[in-house]
Image (cartoon, coloured by chain):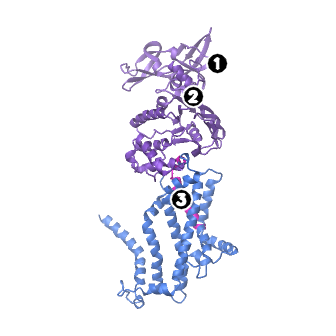
Chain colours: A blue, B purple
């Protein structure tokens, strides 16, 4: 009994430790400026205000960064999922020389630290004339999201019985038709969780965005907000917190809707059958 | 006319050859089983016929058309898979309608066709269900329905009954035979279950190690196995196979093995003196008296008959089948006798050929055989 209580207290302790900064973020974003630095700090705001949100939306580039992030993450997700789906299909269904080693090489690129790749990638993008564009970030994010997506979808694909596709072929479908009619619907949970992983990854990415893009028109939220609100002399805490809340909200909404698919994604490939 | 012909078909996967030069001609409307132990190449053969695998060399024809390079969907075949392979995201109706849809049959015509098939297989109440909501037997019927709805030239069935329980399997065997009789279509049935092959087929193609070992009607496969492999594979309990020596004295053949010595039935011209193998079906041994002596090891009661296992000299085992009333205690000494007229002789080696003089010509086609057996 005592052990059970102790375990519960421990678990709740961890939950609180993780949740408190999020709570503080929300609370800070709705406190008026004068209440922010009061000592002792107020736990819940005495007066609620949305002035920081208003300032953020009307007086800063926040909406541009937000738009950039949406375009960037969506484009990356679509590219990665499209390539990973056909790639995984090829790795699972077709037999050719070097199939297994190719799969491992792909994973190997994922194991390299980003810092190692970032400078060569930057030089490459500059020489291609793509530096400082959203598109350059789409390419960069695809390079590190694709290997993982490919492996995730590969394990999903391996779980789809080959007989299903054979049956569709005998029933008169072309290979592409069988892929569309039979494989894709079966792969949907895998595709959704892969898309979610990729979206979250590109939405939160900071390092590549910092190095590859330095104009406001192409900056995503992560670097944009930091650049705008954090300087050597001053940190705009209230705006920063409001921006953080607004950055998190889309992810939380998407996550809440698709959570069940995501947990299925974590389990994929762990146990066969 | 949809006869199916395999002409020198070889299938290799890398250095492994799954099917070695298969020659097989299946008549129009015939029910043929490909029977053999796992890994004998029977499923590979079926998949090549379906167009899901491609022969390394040789040709496969359906009717007059060589189908080697023709896509599965254009071969006018239907296939039932061992796993049923029902599309999980479609309803029963959707599954059955899929082959029609893929062949461009308008939606208005599909409905009645699906309903007709569903009625035939008693699936009408299940049309709106998803496959996962069905029992194994129901799923199996849906898989059959998907094959039947289109009235193809050739039906391919890959161990369709192996996932059902024994009772349902027996029921479905009868249903399939009835279906074949009604449709009159060519059916190729892959199984490792000899009971299924024996009870359902017009002819059985027994395969081993990628080679065709015999292709004949079930009774011929049983009474005149073409070689030692078929002899040992067909029949439960298996045929007794005893190694010994064949000798000839003044035109009469003798077989001598450990504890057994007998004069042989008429042998074919290719029989030679030397090492050979005697095959005796369990029902062709009479116990009680006779020249062969042994010790009863065990008597298994199956209800309608008893299986007697007797140990002879050199630890040779002889299995016999006797009526349920006959019983001996383990350890008891026993005499027995082999019905020489029904004994089989094979050349030495695991696939030694049959040496008996043939009673039926194995080269005959099904129609000839049917005419013979009815006449």
The residue depicted at 65 percent of the width and 53 percent of the height is A98
Q: Is residue B76 visible?
A: yes
Query: Disc 2 is attached to a residue of which chain?
Result: B
SS at mark 2 in the image: strand
Q: Is residue B236 above or below residue A117?
A: above
Q: Position of residue A155 (x, y in %)?
A: 53, 56
Where is mark 1, residue-wise?
Answer: B270
State yes or no: discs 2 and 3 in contact (Cβ < 8 Å): no
| Magenta-tinted stretch | A143-167
SS at mark 3 in the image: helix
Query: Disc 1 is attached to a residue of which chain?
Result: B
Q: Is residue B86 visible?
A: no
Where is mark 2, residue-wise?
Answer: B215
Q: Position of residue B270 (x, y in %)?
A: 64, 18
The residue depicted at 55 percent of the width and 73 percent of the height is A71
Q: Is residue B364 left or right of residue A48?
A: right
Q: Is residue B371 left or right of residue B125?
A: right
Report, in whole angstroms, how far the alpha carbon at label 3 lies from the one at label 1. Answer: 61 Å
Give yes or no for residue B259 being in the magenta stretch.
no
Which of discs 2 and 1 lies nearer the camera? The answer is 2
Nearest the viewer among B237 and B67 is B67
Where is mark 3, residue-wise?
Answer: A153
């Amino acid at each position: 009994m005592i052990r059970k209580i102790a375990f519960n207290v421990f678990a709740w302790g961890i939950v609180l430790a993780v949740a408190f900064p999020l709570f503080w973020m929300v609370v800070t974003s709705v406190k008026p400026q004068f209440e922010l630095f009061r000592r002792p700090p107020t736990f819940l705001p005495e007066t609620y205000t949305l002035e920081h949100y208003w300032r953020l939306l009307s007086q800063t580039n926040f909406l541009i960064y937000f738009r950039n992030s949406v375009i960037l993450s969506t484009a990356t997700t679509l590219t990665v999922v499209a390539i990973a789906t056909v790639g995984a299909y090829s790795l699972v269904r077709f037999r050719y020389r070097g199939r297994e080693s190719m799969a491992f090489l792909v994973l190997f690129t994922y194991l390299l630290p980003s810092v190692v790749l970032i400078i060569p990638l930057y030089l490459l993008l500059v020489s291609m004339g793509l530096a400082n564009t959203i598109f350059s970030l789409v390419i960069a994010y695809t390079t590190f999201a694709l290997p993982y997506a490919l492996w995730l979808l590969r394990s999903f694909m391996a779980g789809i019985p080959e007989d299903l596709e054979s049956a569709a072929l005998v029933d008169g479908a072309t290979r592409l038709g069988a892929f569309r009619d039979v494989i894709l619907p079966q792969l949907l949970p895998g595709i959704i969780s892969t898309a979610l992983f990729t979206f979250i990854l590109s939405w939160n990415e900071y390092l590549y965005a910092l190095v590859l893009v330095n104009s406001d028109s192409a900056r995503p939220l992560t670097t944009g907000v930091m650049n705008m609100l954090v300087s050597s002399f001053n940190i705009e805490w209230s705006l920063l917190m409001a921006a953080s809340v607004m950055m998190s909200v889309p992810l939380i909404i998407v996550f809440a809707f698709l959570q069940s698919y995501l947990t299925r994604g974590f389990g994929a490939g762990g146990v066969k059958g | 006319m949809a006869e199916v012909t395999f002409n020198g078909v070889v299938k290799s996967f890398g250095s492994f050859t799954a099917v070695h030069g298969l020659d097989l001609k299946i008549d129009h409307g015939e029910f043929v089983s490909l029977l053999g132990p796992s890994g004998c190449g029977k499923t590979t053969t079926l998949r090549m016929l379906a167009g899901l695998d491609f022969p390394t060399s040789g040709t496969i024809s359906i009717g007059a058309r060589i189908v080697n390079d023709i896509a599965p969907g254009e071969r006018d075949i239907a296939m039932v898979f061992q796993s049923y392979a029902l599309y999980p995201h479609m309803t029963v109706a959707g599954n059955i309608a899929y082959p029609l849809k893929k062949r461009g049959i308008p939606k208005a015509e599909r409905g009645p066709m699906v309903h007709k098939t569903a009625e035939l297989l008693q699936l009408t109440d299940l049309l709106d269900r998803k496959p996962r909501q069905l029992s194994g037997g129901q799923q199996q019927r849906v898989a059959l329905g998907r094959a039947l709805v289109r009235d193809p030239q050739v039906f391919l069935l890959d161990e369709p009954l192996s996932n059902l329980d024994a009772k349902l399997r027996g029921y479905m065997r009868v249903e399939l035979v009835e279906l074949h009789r009604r449709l009159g279509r060519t059916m190729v049935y892959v199984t490792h279950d000899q009971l299924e092959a024996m009870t359902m087929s017009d002819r059985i193609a027994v395969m081993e190690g990628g080679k065709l070992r015999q292709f004949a009607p079930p009774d011929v496969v049983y009474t005149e196995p073409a070689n030692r492999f078929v002899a040992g594979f067909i029949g439960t309990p298996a045929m007794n196979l005893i190694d010994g020596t064949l000798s000839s004295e003044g035109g009469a053949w003798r077989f001598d093995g450990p504890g057994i010595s007998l004069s042989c039935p008429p042998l074919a011209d290719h029989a030679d003196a030397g090492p050979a193998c005697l095959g005796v079906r369990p029902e062709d041994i009479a116990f009680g008296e006779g020249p062969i002596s042994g010790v009863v090891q065990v008597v298994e009661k199956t209800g309608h008959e008893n299986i007697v296992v007797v140990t002879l000299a050199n630890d040779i085992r002889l299995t016999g089948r006797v009526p349920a009333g006959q019983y001996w205690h383990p350890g008891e000494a026993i005499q027995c006798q082999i019905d020489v007229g029904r004994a089989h002789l094979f050349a030495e080696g695991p696939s030694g050929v049959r040496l008996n003089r043939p009673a039926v010509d194995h080269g005959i086609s099904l129609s000839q055989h049917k005419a013979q057996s009815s006449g």
